[in-house]
Image: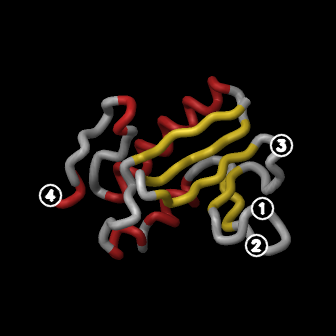
Amino acid sequence: MFQECNLNIRYDLPKEIWDTIELVYMKMPGWLGFGTKNKGYEGLPHWFSFNEDEKHIIASVEPSGLQLVANMEEDEWLLWKTNFKKVATEILGFNVGEIEEGEVGHDLEWIN
């Protein structure tokens, strides 16, 4: 089942924050690492599988924020996504959530 979300982890965050994002990735269940020329999407973080036809999650940095795209059952996705937001909030030091869901505002909360 196709799933996706955009989080307020923006491309223009300070380098100090981007330097710690891999810690968030590594703490999440199913972490495989970054894709390479031979598996998955090169340079993008992957969880569960590098094969799009199997259960997987891929992240990419878009102008709107960190986009997570998944092929997995909705219940499992909701748990994983909720955990990602919690872990990211703890490690990055600002409230990580989805603007579209009203979890965070449009302001740059990470500045404080």
Which residue does the numbered mark 4 point to in the structure image? 112
- Residue 36: mark in rendering: 2
- Disc 3 from disc 1: Cα separation: 12 Å
As displayed, is residue 73 above or below residue 66? above
Q: Name the residue type under label 2.
A: Thr
Q: Are marks 2 and 1 in contact (CB under 8 Å)?
A: yes
Say which element carries label 2.
Answer: loop
At horizontal 52% and vertical 50% (from top left) the residue drawn is 67
Residue 98 sits in which quadrant?
top left
Q: Could you tell me residue 95's position as x and y percent?
A: 29, 46
Identify the mark nearer the N-term, 4 or 1.
1
The residue carrying pointer 2 sits among few (fewer than 14), some (14 to 19) or many (20 or more) residues within 10 Å by Cα, namely few
Q: Name which of mark 3 and mark 4 comes first in the sequence.
A: 3
Q: How far, Cα to Cα, is label 2 from label 3?
A: 18 Å
- The mark lying in front, picked from 4 and 1, is 1
Residue shown at 38% from the left, 58% from the top: 10
Inspect the image, locate mark 4, and give the three-letter code of the amino acid beneath it.
Asn
Answer with mark 2 or mark 3, whichever residue precedes in sequence: 2
Q: Which residue is mark 1?
A: 40
Crowding near the residue tagged with mark 3, few <14, some 14–19, many ≥20 C-alpha atoms within 10 Å = few
